[in-house]
């Protein structure tokens, strides 16, 4: 298991023992709305960083809708092409599809139709991602953050419907804890899981902040054979003081799960 942190590469001013990669935002790392020339400067910095980006999150901005009456498939596909091409250049293998603002179902719009739109979109995104050697991981969010794909079971259902090897699922222990999403839903996702996030459900702090035991989630991941990346995606009270112990605690809970 590889431990990462949701932060930009230049956000780490000091080395953190045991931290193996970073997971910045797509806007900050890949700047899809900027020219290729502007991206080249960011690419040079990313390649020179001591801890490299292996994943990136916040796939779509809120004004680029994946559901509702204003979906623009041409604009979406162009965005995905740019993101995946630049992710490959940086060396990021995972693109996290959380993007609650983009995928949230507009008021009055049929939720079943919105789910169909997400599946149709991901069916197009899969071949684009495959062309660049990138995997898109759909992230179930808690019900306060989004009104669709709010459980592991729902996320797995849509990923299966998209039916493409480069469209997979993300497990986030924070979102699961907030909504009480059952741990055994991870087992039902089986081979779909390609990435993971973690934070304590109480306050979204790093592991060790209030002492939550997240080993049941980690045990469930191990039971399905997952041994990939887990990113700390947290709210920090004192980043410099908490980051080192959080990495140690994550490793300890994983190894004792």
Image (cartoon, rainbow, N blue to C red):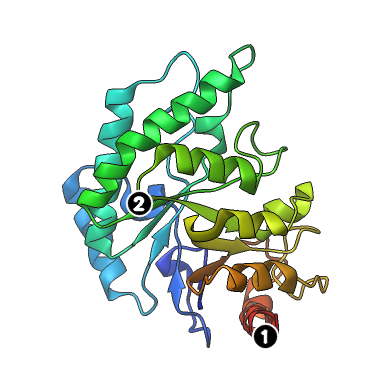
Q: Is residue 154 above or below residue 7?
A: above
Residue at image x 56%, y 67%? 224
Q: In the picture, residue 112 is in which quadrant?
A: top right
Looking at this view, name the residue that lies furthest to the left: 37
Query: Of the residues tagged 1 and 2, which is closer to the observer?
Result: 2
Does dot 2 land on a helix, a strand or a loop? loop
Q: Which class describes the residues within 10 Å of circle 1: few (<14), some (14-19), or many (20+)?
A: few
Q: Quadrant of residue 214?
A: bottom right
Residue 230: x percent and y percent? 54, 69
Neighbor class of circle 2 (other Cα within 10 Å; few <14, some 14-19, many 20+) is some
Judge from the rendering whether residue 112 lies leftward or rightward of residue 212; answer left or right: left
Which disc, if any, is residue 252?
1
Looking at the picture, how far across and down is residue 42, in whole percent? 28, 59
Where residue 93 appears, as percent x and y from the top left, is 34, 61
Mark 1 lies on a secondary structure that is helix
Who comes first in sequence, dot 1 or dot 2?
2
State whether residue 66 appears in this view.
no
In the displayed structure image, the side of residue 96 where residue 249 appears, left or right: right
> Residue placed at 54% from the left, 48% from the top?
139
- Is 119 above or below relative to 83? above
Q: Which residue is mark 2?
A: 165
**Residue drawn at 35 percent across, 51 percent down:** 165
Q: Nearer the viewer, residue 107 or 40?
A: 107
Location of the C terminus by quadrant is bottom right
Give the vertical position of 185 relative to 46 (above or below). above
- For the residues bearing labels 1 and 2, Cβ distance under 8 angstroms: no
User: Residue 90 — which label?
Assistant: none
Using the image, determine if residue 147 lies above or below residue 23.
above
Total numbered badges shown on the rendered structure: 2
Label 1 and label 2: CA atoms lie apart by 31 Å
Residue at screen point 59% across, 15% down? 110
Specify whether 22 is left or right of 182. Answer: left
């Amino acid at each position: 298991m590889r431990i990462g942190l949701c932060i930009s590469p230049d956000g780490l001013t000091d080395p953190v023992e045991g931290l193996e990669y970073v997971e910045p935002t797509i806007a900050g790392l890949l700047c899809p709305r900027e020219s290729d020339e502007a991206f080249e400067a960011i690419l040079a910095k990313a390649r020179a960083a001591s801890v490299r980006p292996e994943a990136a999150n916040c796939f779509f901005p809120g004004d680029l809708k994946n559901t509702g009456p204003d979906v623009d498939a041409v604009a979406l596909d162009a965005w995905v092409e740019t993101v995946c091409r630049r992710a490959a250049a940086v060396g990021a293998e995972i693109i996290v599809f959380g993007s609650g603002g983009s995928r949230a179902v507009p008021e009055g719009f049929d939720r079943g139709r919105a789910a169909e739109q997400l599946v149709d979109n991901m069916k197009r995104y899969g071949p684009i991602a495959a062309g660049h050697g990138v995997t898109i991981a759909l992230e179930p969010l808690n019900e306060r953050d989004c009104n669709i794909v709010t459980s592991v079971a729902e996320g797995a259902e849509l990923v299966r419907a998209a039916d493409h090897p480069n469209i997979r699922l993300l497990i986030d222990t924070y979102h699961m804890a907030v909504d009480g999403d059952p741990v055994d839903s991870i087992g039902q996702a089986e081979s779909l899981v390609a990435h993971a996030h973690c934070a304590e459900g109480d306050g979204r702090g790093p592991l060790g902040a209030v002492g939550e035991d997240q080993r049941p989630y980690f045990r469930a991941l191990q039971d399905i054979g997952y041994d990939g990346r887990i990113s700390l995606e947290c709210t920090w009270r004192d980043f410099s003081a908490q980051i080192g112990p959080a990495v140690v605690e994550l490793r300890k809970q994983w190894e004792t799960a």
